[in-house]
Image: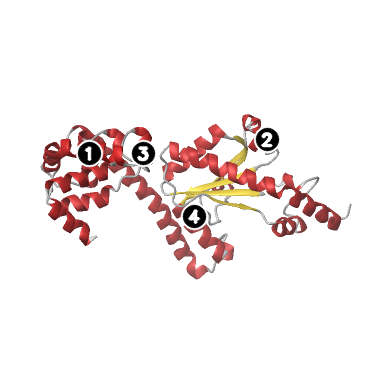
Amino acid sequence: MAKKVDIDVAKIEYEDHIKEFEKFEKAVIDQISVLINENDIKLATPIQSRIKAFASLSEKHESGRFTMKKSILELQDLIGFRILMLFKRDVESIVRLINDNFEILKEYNTDEKLSADQFGYSSKHLTIKIKDEWLKVPLYKNLGKYTGEIQIRTLSQHHWAETSNILQYKDKTSAPREILRSIGRVSALLEMVDLEYERLLNEREKYNEEIKTDYNKSEKLNVDTLKIVLDKNLPIKNRKDEEPYSELLKEILEFGIDTSEELEDLIVRRKDEVMIAEKEALKNNTVNPREDIGVYYSFAGLIRSVMRFEDAEKYAKIREKK
């Protein structure tokens, strides 16, 4: 069969499948998003995805970069996903989660494909299918024949990848000799960013472990000691996943509370009044989304109430400034 006819047939097949491609794309994003939230992993950006346009698929076939034998479904990256992480350690965490929850057809790191004279970036690539048990759910029953490619890397790695793609400097032969050193410096700096982020995280974890058991209550409050004080002195069920600790700390310091000891004393002094106000608010409210767990205020709400009960006028002035 002539190549032109092959492409025409492929276009019909593409159009027949496009709705299912979109369904597969959404299903994968939904599942990965749940896994990310359940494991408290922070993304640099929302998950990106695309279904390869038929014009791109056709060009790839015509140029010989992809030879279609029977079906467009032979192209495993027809549906693509990109997950950008803030921290290098989270790349491996996401890879493990995907391995545990999807069928992995292929896995590789772009580092392994580069020769010594090429400029590259680290990026994990996973070719996936949904697991057979998904197919028992009516919404997913027709998705078993589709595959997708998931690309996972840090934001720093992504910056380098996008820059090198735009400049089209793939190796030493494609880059002017005069700027080779500059290219090397940029690549090294971005790699150093990831390494320093890891160092920062390790130091922060070590510090937080130390202050859990022993910290100087007379030292000036910071975000990490604030978390410890609130966990210790407030009902844990009131704590939200995303508390505005930094913003709250600023208000507390403006209120004149500088140390953990002073904050603990204030909470103890006003806690009974605040918890009575919590019960009243819960009883009188009809739209609180957290009512099902028996709470109204978050940690931030409780501490702001503490300050209001202590000195309403002073706290009102702090809020007015905002």
Give the amino acid at mark 3: Arg
Identify the residue under disc 1: 230
- Residue ID at (26%, 50%): 246
Identify the residue under disc 3: 290
Front residue of 209/141: it is 141
Kindly report which numbered mark, 4 or 3, lies closer to the viewer in this rendering. 3
> Sequence-wise, which precedes: disc 3 or disc 1?
1
Q: In this rendering, is residue 164 above or below 315? A: below
Kindly report which numbered mark, 3 or 2, lies closer to the viewer in this rendering. 3
> Which mark, by number, is residue 158?
4
Residue 133 position, x and y percent, is 62, 29
The answer for how far apart the CA atoms under marks 3 and 1 are is: 19 Å
> Sequence-wise, which precedes: disc 4 or disc 3?
4
- Label pair 1/2, CB-CB below 8 angstroms: no
Quadrant for the C terminus, please.
bottom left
Q: For the residue carrying disc 3, how many other residues have a C-alpha within 10 Å: few (<14), some (14-19), or many (20+)?
A: some
> Which mark, by number, is residue 141?
2
Q: Secondary structure beneath disc 2?
A: loop
- Residue ID at (12%, 46%): 310
Q: For the residue carrying disc 1, how many other residues have a C-alpha within 10 Å: few (<14), some (14-19), or many (20+)?
A: many
Q: Quadrant of residue 106?
A: top right
